[in-house]
Amino acid sequence: MSSGRVSRHARIRMIAAVATVCALSAAPLAPQAVAAGTPPHSETYRPRFHFTPDKNWMNDPNGLVYFKGEYHLFYQYNPNGNSWGDMSWGHAVSKDLVHWKELPLALSHDDKEMVFSGSAVVDRDNTTGFGTKKNPAMVAIYTSAYKNGGKQAQSLAYSTDRGRTWTKYQGNPVIDIGSKDFRDPKVQWYAPTKSWLMTVSMSAEHKVRFYSSKNLKDWELQSEFGPAGATGGVWECPDLFPLAVDGDKKKIKWVLVVNINPGGIAGGSAAQYFVGDFDGKKFTAEDKGTYTPPTGTVVQDFEGTDFGSWTTTGTAFGQAPAAGAVEGQGTVEGFDGQGLANSFHSGDAATGTLTSPSFTVDSKYLNFKVGGGRHPHVDGTVMEQGDPPAGTVLADFEGGTYGDWTTTGDAFGSAPATGTLGGQQEVSGFLGDGLVNSYLDGDTTTGTLTSPEFTIDKDYVNFLVGGGNRPAGSDNPTAVELLVDGKVVRSATGQDGEALNWASWDVKDLAGKKAQIKIVDDNSGGWGHLNVDHIMLSDTQARPVSQETSVNLIVDGKVVRSATGSNSETLDWTSFDMRAYAGKQARIQIVDMNNAGWGHLLADQFTAADTAAKSVVQRADWADYGKDYYAAVSWEDAPDGKRYMIGWMNNWDYSGVVPTSPWRGAQSIPREMALRTVDGRIRLTSRPVNSVTSLRQKRPATAAGVTVKNTSQTLIGPAAQGEALDIEATFSLKDADRFGLKVRTGAGGEETVIGYDTTAQELYVDRTRSGAVDFNSTFPGVQTAPLKAKNGKVKLRILVDRSSVEVFGGSGEAVITDQIFPDPAAQGVQIFAENGSVKLDRARVWHLDSYRD
């Protein structure tokens, strides 16, 4: 079970994280239900060929097993709503891994437990006694997440009717070590010892445990693996399986998949893997050796007695480099030499900047080490909160009353709060002496606070907001809403932090309309409250105050590159690509504007170099380099010894606010996995399952021998346009710096760019202009995957759906999976080349039918 809201919120409360920027969205917040009489499953963004439930929340795939001609897909499911909660197992089956039939709920939560992630096996020898040898039971091994105390333990349920109905084992749990972070058992039959093998996660310790059993009920610990590789977040949903290397069945290696959240290659959630050997008890990963960063010219190593020509503001960085940890700080590791920049002086509450003198960019890369807090830079923020913009104040919540605002429920009390309430972390960022604070008597209280009607006569509605991130349109929101004609037309939330920050709605299109502000607290769980102050109409947009902890590259007064720590006191290498700024003047600025948990930054060893340094995360191996492939696990007992894998196509950074309704969550296309030797190293590769071709319509649109130079042009023509496509394309390198395809192109510049960077030798997906991207600050961006051209050619397989792209590069060693939310009318496909030309050897584009057809 992905940690998601449960453990993440607990962790956030402990470190008192604050908002980086308010979550805003324009109306409608989520697509409206399809009008009566239109075909089912035709909602905006509803995938055509990726599995989604008819309604409600879905995350991790579970219980993947093949039995009697059916591939079973169970999944984490909330039977009661469109946000995470009441975790149970949903169920679907398929005969070909493409055409899915949704079945009734399989395993339900109850008063005692939620049913977290796990696996399923067919007990052919009836080792459990749950079935017979003639009619073997299907046995689910899942994590019981107990509601009283939060303990996690491993339990069983069984079915004797092909998974249609289930009985929980009376002897549950079968493994209980008293831990709150012990989950996601993957079980398989291990033939050499004629026993069951369980791979299960000790998530907070970054460890995987291996247990053995003869009957699925009595388990014996065999060994542990980890920590290793990327450890920036919890380890979840492990999987272990053997594969032949390069198809040679005499050369078998084992693959251990460990999903991680956060700390993935593209930020947030991701699927990491290790290749190695397994002897029945212990997994041993292949030794990848020690890392030596590229050589270059050291710009600043903080080895002096002061900061030299670098200048400071504030108090966070002190007067000179630190010699490691400072007072009150945990052990700091990973810096070079004796000194480093460390903004923990006076603790997390202190803020400030450390800025280099201006310099001319004359190297391809700027490599440096960074650690500390993960609070990214957000464009449009300012360093200091000045006076509010001029305008009309609708409510400042001063004077001890709500005036003519009306309340329901008990969350808001009878009058504004004067600051922090009992049991609450410190509230900051409000103006004057009063504010709205729905933490009255804790998170359990709910209610609303509604303004009188007013006329929208200015361009913006500005206000300060903090507290919980539960958007309008989700179950049990904590949201500030703008109502026109009784309908929600704008909405904003906090970001699970007590600090208030400016939010702003552009309301030019609503000029002259009558409106109301409604503050809603309908949430009684963690972060189930809202802080609001100083609501005003203005012709000037209020700019939120920076709450970043970041290293920024500033060119022409703008932040053009930025990096953060990963909520760790260990520094690690990162790199800025400087090629686009050659010859320009630039400055490095280390910024700590955050005064809450992990509100500090560590930096060292700034080096100009011709090659990019790689972090531990970049040096780790990833099953997918996109933002939206998590909880990846594989099917047991697939025919012909095939190994098929599927992942949840989402990211915990924004999973609760993706703009889909009445469902939320999709699964990736199932993939056939293989081990191949790539550049002298064994890599896990993947390709879409062959049966995807059964969805292809008629003949493909084709193009061949097309050379493009410094431009974008339509590929093939109208025949290649669409919202659900299967594209195969092969390019021959010429002299273009970057080239590739743009999909889902349309009016207003919408596009999703799928490209190849010849200098960096990287495949990339750019979704910054892919439609709706503003529902979370971490959503827009560019994802990259290392990929070397082969014989001067780059081969791509691209699956485009209504709300996703999956890109498979080369032999499947570079895969990027990203959600996109384009305008339904944006269906164009283009070929492009930048700074030179490229030749498209051949492209074929098929339209794909729905799996429900």
Image (cartoon, helix red, strand yellow):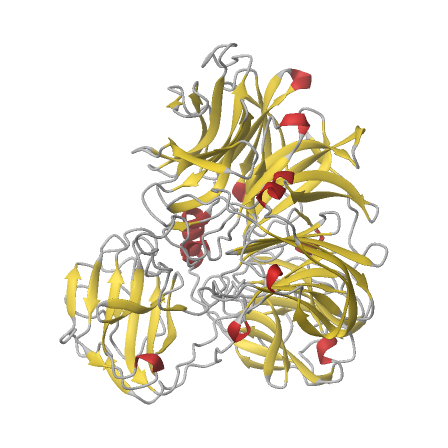
Q: Is residue 177 visible?
A: no
How far across and how far down the image is residue 10, in percent? 41, 50
How far across and how far down the image is residue 200, in percent? 55, 33
In the image, is 171 to the left or to the right of 449?
right
Along the line of sight, which residue is nearer the eye, 593 or 463?
463
In the image, is 290 to the left or to the right of 485?
right
Q: Image quarter for residue 190?
A: top right
Q: Image quarter for residue 275?
A: top right
The residue lying at 46 percent from left, 57 percent from top is 654
In the image, is 297 to the left or to the right of 577?
right
Tell how many labels.
Answer: 0
| Residue farthest to the right, as pictured | 791
How far across and how far down the image is residue 499, in percent? 38, 68
| Residue farthest to the bottom, as pictured | 390
The residue lying at 57 percent from left, 47 percent from top is 260
Along the line of sight, which residue is nearer the eye, 381 or 88?
88
Q: Image quarter for residue 332?
A: bottom right
Q: Is residue 60 visible?
A: yes
**Against 717, is 630 above or below?**
above
The residue lying at 48 percent from left, 70 percent from top is 594
Along the line of sight, which residue is nearer the eye, 369 or 758?
758
How far across and how far down the image is residue 441, in percent? 22, 56
| Residue farthest to the front, as pictured | 698
**Against 262, is 328 above or below?**
below
In the image, is 21 to the left or to the right of 435?
right
Along the line of sight, which residue is nearer the eye, 563 or 239?
239
